[in-house]
Amino acid sequence: MTYKTIEKGAVDAACVMQDYQLEYQKFHWEQAEQALAGLPEGGLNIAFEAVDRHLNTDVAEKAALTFLSRNSTDIEHSLTYQQLAEQSSRFASALQQMGLKPGDRVYCLAGRIPELFITALGTLKFGGVFSPLFSAFGPEPIRSRLEIGQASVLVTTEKLYQKKLATWLLELDFLKHCLVVTEPEHTAPAGTESFHTLLQQGDPGYQCHPTRPEDPALLHFTSGTTGKPKGALHVHQAVVAHRMTAQFALDLRQDDIYWCTADPGWVTGTSYGILAPLTLGATLIIDPADFDAERWYSILQDRGVTVWYTAPTAIRMLMKYGTELPQQVDLTALRHMASVGEPLNPEAVVWGTKALGKPFHDNWWQTETGGIMIANYPCLPIKPGSMGKPMPGITAAIARRTDAGIEWVDAPGEAGELVLKAGWPSMFRSYLHEEARYQKAFQDGWYFTGDLAQFDEEGYFWFVGRADDVIKSSGHLIGPFEVESALMEHPAVAEAGVIGVPDELGGEVVKAFIALKPGYQANEELIREVLGLARKRLGPAVAPKSIEVRDNLPKTRSGKIMRRLLKARELGLPEGDISTMEGNNE
Ligand code: AMP
């Protein structure tokens, strides 16, 4: 079914982008760079742009972060820009007092608590590299990410420490400090230090380290098809894109009440859940609780949210509750709604107009791009199901890689790999310790995104699918190899192949196929045991939802499990080229 184009509404005079075509033609990155303050003595620092630049302005005394209570939509705790500047300076100074050096990596494993924001901004101020971890990860993904990045510091909560880290964390010889956010009356567990004690000892007047635009700032892990997770490294220059994309794609302005529902463990939670909105002086709503449809509508109403950035899985869950709930709340303050992370079904865009009075604006980007690259804008009509058009400053195209060079797809409606002309400010600068893997992502000055897409006659881009075996489940990118490795740890498992299968709510869910070692019998108890092990090791968000036992799994002659074939067979799709399959002698 094709959906009717949603014509643009009246573009409000204060809208940051009034005319897409004009903006796209005249835009230069230098223009976005000039909008930044820069460090007083030269240099560029993301945290300075997010917080300190607002000191001595009208923004200093307004709320930067407002944390909601778990039990109601009341504000439980709020920090002004001035307070956030002081707290993050204290943390930066504490890092200095601990003997850390700029460039050292500070990780955070926590939910949406004030300490996470203070850690992120303080680390950046100190010149350290901030790396968030998803709090629903099990010990295995946490450990591998700490190891790859050789974390110097980990900030976490008492609860997460006891549940996931206590038995092994302190063995890591590279980890110098574990800082634990404890209940006020508790002391930090043995071998760790109290986050708040150190914070109190820090200097609230600490001046931002003179970082340069190309100094490393953020480390985000993402999953590939093979091998370990990839550590995508971003630099301070990324803030040029953070700020500008939030203006153009989210229409974000200083007087906005902004709510980003992304988990802080993933890149959206940092780029648009912390940094970009602060650079614009907006007020952020932070909800520590999990999804709950009624609560979410109440937050939109009670907190007067004006710009809302959310994700398809959440929108699909809201859709399940129908249009009655949103009709009981007053959403007149809400001006702009955007979505990211996975394909946004056209029905969801249209549902927005019916249930909430406005459409969701889909946009596309990924960990490696550091910021929004393709978007629907308030000043353009929306074609439901399309990701929109490239951001000003971004050249997107559809291409195929060949040994002879890039083969361009010039015809509308023809699928190929989505590529971006390299060189935008928030482009990742390396995959940590994996230069060859990094180089492989580029060809002739273009970055190959790993996504298949197509464009139409009017220059709108449409997502087609992933070019690799990576799984997107409820917005989380999951590497099949990481899951397979955990399954193989069970003594009964001889082989494992993991795929994503379509799911109405989560987009995809993880399904595993295993073959057993001789002497083991497939039965429900064994499957439950393997599933249990995977959940314990990986955490419920990453572990398979179901496991099927096969006598053997399809493999290439070189012994690689053919996930693509497993998936085709599971979904009844054409099997494609199976000439390389082991045992196929046709
Ligand atoms: P991550 O690096 O975890 O942010 O995941 C990035 C991947 O999520 C992209 O490469 C896409 O496969 C998918 N993705 C993100 N946004 C969209 C979107 N608007 N439509 C379709 N897929 C998306």
Image (spheres, grey):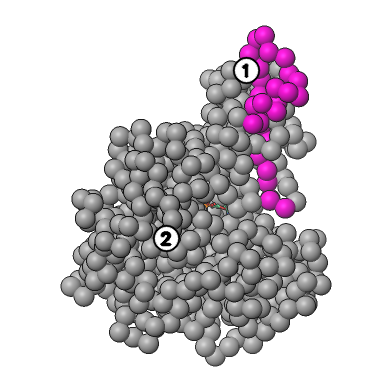
| Residue 45, position as x, y percentages in the image | 29, 66
Q: Is residue 57 magenta?
A: no
Residue 374 appears left or right of 521: left
At 78% from the left and 61% from the top, the residue drawn is 320
At 71% from the left and 64% from the top, the residue drawn is 293
Give the vertical position of 584 relative to 181 (above or below): above
Mark closer to the observer (1, 2) = 2
| Residue 347, position as x, y percentages in the image | 76, 64
Where, quadrant-wise, is the C terminus in this rendering? top right
At 70% from the left and 26% from the top, the residue drawn is 527
Where, quadrant-wise, is the N terminus in this rendering? bottom right
Q: From the Cβ of disc 2, is ligand 1 less than 8 Å away?
A: no
- 246 or 81, nearer to the observer: 81
Label 2 amino acid?
A: Glu
At 63% from the left and 66% from the top, the residue drawn is 71
Q: Which residue is label 2 attached to?
A: 115
Task: Using the image, tell me which numbered label, if any, was put on residue 492.
Answer: 1
CB-based contact (under 8 Å), mark 1 and mark 2: no
| Residue 370, position as x, y percentages in the image | 44, 58
- 513 or 585, nearer to the observer: 513
Q: Is residue 544 visible?
A: yes
Q: Secondary structure at mark 2?
A: helix
Categorize mark 1 by other alpha carbons within 10 Å: few (<14), some (14-19), many (20+). Answer: some
Task: State which region is magenta.
Answer: 505-532
Q: Is residue 25 visible?
A: no
Label 1 amino acid?
A: Ala
Q: Secondary structure at mark 1?
A: loop
